[in-house]
Image (cartoon, rainbow, N blue to C red):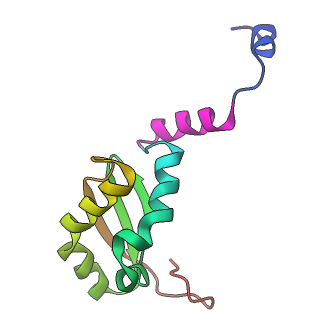
Amino acid sequence: MTRDSAARRGPRPVKDSLNRLLRGLGSPPADVLTALFEHWPAAAGPALAAHARPARLVNRRLTVDVDDPVWAAQVRLQESELVARLGEFLGDGKVQFIRPRVAGGRNRDGHLGR
């Protein structure tokens, strides 16, 4: 493709370019990631959501940062329930596995940090 033919087509929507990039990284489309972060508190429940947050979703494996090993164990115990609940919000099969990862605790603002 020449530069002139690209110019005639006009600009591409940013969403298309972002989704192409995400697909190349093994991630789902941007709207699925947005829904994941938006619906995590409802899917996880208030107690777990206060101590765990989604960090990345690659090849249908969700990595969840937790602030303590106790919460990592809780995520493991609830994995099948969490996968089912996330399926309700994101669509079946978007998340198939959940891997907890102990993060560096909370920062000054009270948010999980690394």
Q: Give the main secondary structure, helix, strand or loop, of the magenta stretch.
A: helix
Q: Which residues are magenta?
A: 13-26
Q: Quadrant of residue 109?
A: bottom right
Q: Residue 74, image x and y in percent?
A: 24, 81
Front-most of 11 and 85? 85
Quarter occupied by the N terminus: top right
Q: Residue at x 43, y 73 (%)?
A: 41
Residue 98 on image: x %, y %: 28, 63
Q: Residue at position x 36%, y 78% from top?
A: 45
Please tell me whether residue 1 is drawn above or below residue 28 in the rendered image. Answer: above
Q: Residue at x 35, y 69 (%)?
A: 43
Q: Residue drawn at (81%, 9%), measured in percent from left and top?
A: 4
User: Is residue 8 shown in magenta?
Assistant: no
Say which of 7 and 90 sits in front.
90
Q: Is residue 21 magenta?
A: yes
Percent position of residue 13, x then y: 69, 32
Pick the residue in front: 64 or 9: 9
5 vs 64, left or right, is: right
The foreground one among 114 and 88 is: 88
Q: Position of residue 8 (x, y in %)?
A: 80, 11
Vertical position of residue 68 compared to residue 102: above or below: below
Is residue 95 shown left or right of residue 57? Answer: left
